[in-house]
Amino acid sequence: MSDYDERRQQRREEEHRYQMDAMYEVWRAGGNTDRIDCDRVSNHHGNGDSYEAAARDELRRQRPRPSEE
């Protein structure tokens, strides 16, 4: 395996671990892990955000919006 392939594999593993950590935090907080947007979580990872921040964002998006009555 070339150095490039090894680095690529390592980045994939880091991102996967990040996504699983964010998913675990959503689950712990009572959120629905099936409603997590993996692309959005990947964007958080790419931006250097913590997985906790990604989980908070996903939880915030899962909360029902208040009705305007």
Image (tube, rainbow, N blue to C red):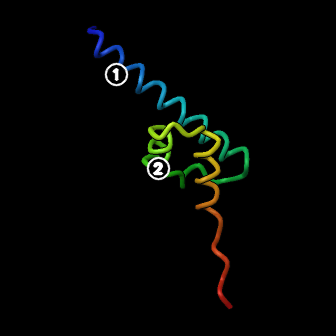
| Image position of 58 (left or right of 46) | right
The residue at which mark 2 appears reads as 40
Tell which circle, 1 or 2, labels the residue nearer the N-terminal end.
1
Give the tally of numbered discs. 2
Q: CA distance from mark 1 to mark 2?
A: 20 Å
| Image position of 66 (left or right of 7) | right
Callout 1: 10 Å neighbours few (<14), some, many (20+)?
A: few
Q: Say which quadrant the N terminus sits in.
A: top left
Callout 2: 10 Å neighbours few (<14), some, many (20+)?
A: few
Q: Residue 8: name its quadrant.
A: top left
Residue at x 60% of width, y 38% of height: 50
The local secondary structure at tag 1 comes to helix
Residue at x 34% of width, y 13% of height: 6
Residue at x 48% of width, y 31% of height: 16
Q: Residue 23: name its quadrant.
A: top right
Residue 35 drawn at (x, y percent): 54, 55
Does residue 18 lie above or below 33 as drawn? above
Q: Where residue 8 is drawn, which disc sits there?
A: 1
Query: Which residue sits furthest right?
Result: 29
Does residue 54 lie above or below 59 as drawn? above
Does residue 12 lie above or below 36 as drawn? above
Asked whether disc 1 touches disc 2, contact meaning CB atoms under 8 Å apart, the reply is no
Q: Residue type at mark 1? A: Arg
Q: Where residue 56 is drawn, which disc sits there?
A: none
The local secondary structure at tag 2 comes to helix
Residue 24 drawn at (x, y percent): 65, 39
